[in-house]
Image (cartoon, rainbow, N blue to C red):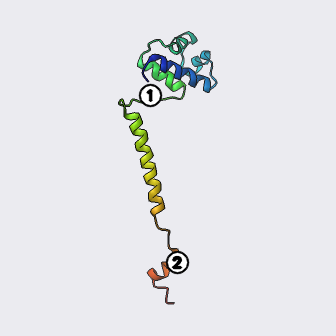
Amino acid sequence: MKSLEEIATLLTEQRRKLGIEQKDMYMRIGMKQQQYQRIEAGSDVKLSTLLRVLEGLDLELSITPKGRKAHSALQASATQAQGEASKSDQLPDDGDDLGFWFGSEDK
């Protein structure tokens, strides 16, 4: 997020996605419609207020160093591909060789 306007847009979109009216935020987080309306309009808010709003909209705050988002996505993709490759390299279980190990093969 680079600006208050981006955060406000995200909050508005999430609230609408959840089918919640601005006035319903009072029931979810104890915030009057006018106060919440100012947040969606992009006004500056305290961190504690933002966290309260995020909780009410089923969102969470994540802080990431600049430039790491793309790197993290690439790293996650590589890790997933590596995991899939190692699964395909595994040998199938030989359940029929139990007799050899337990000496019942000759019986």
- Residue drawn 49% across and 89% down? 106
Q: What amino acid is found at the position of numbered circle 2 in the picture? A: Asp
Vertical arrangement, residue 72 with respect to residue 43, above or below = below
* Residue 64 screen position, x and y as percent: 38, 31
* Residue 46 screen position, x and y as percent: 42, 16
Vertical arrangement, residue 92 with respect to residue 45, above or below = below
- Residue drawn 43% across and 39% down? 73
Taking the image as shown, residue 1 lies to the left or right of residue 15, namely left
Query: Quick one: which residue is furthest to the top in this view?
Result: 34
- Residue drawn 37% across and 32% down? 67
Q: What amino acid is found at the position of numbered circle 1 in the picture? A: Leu
**Label of residue 96 in the image:** 2
Of residues 41 and 104, the one nearer the viewer is: 41
Circle 2: element type: helix
Whether label 1 touches label 2, CB < 8 Å: no
* Residue 69 screen position, x and y as percent: 41, 34
Label 1 Cα neighbours within 10 Å, binned few <14 / some 14-19 / many ≥20? few
Distance, label 1 to label 2, CA atoms, is 53 Å
Q: Tell me the residue that label 1 is attached to.
A: 61
* Residue 19 screen position, x and y as percent: 64, 24
Circle 1: element type: loop
Of residues 68 and 96, the one nearer the viewer is: 68
Query: Quick one: which residue is furthest to the left in this view?
Result: 65
Of residues 59 and 69, the one nearer the viewer is: 69
Disc nearer the start of the sequence (1/2): 1
How many discs mark residues in the rendered view?
2
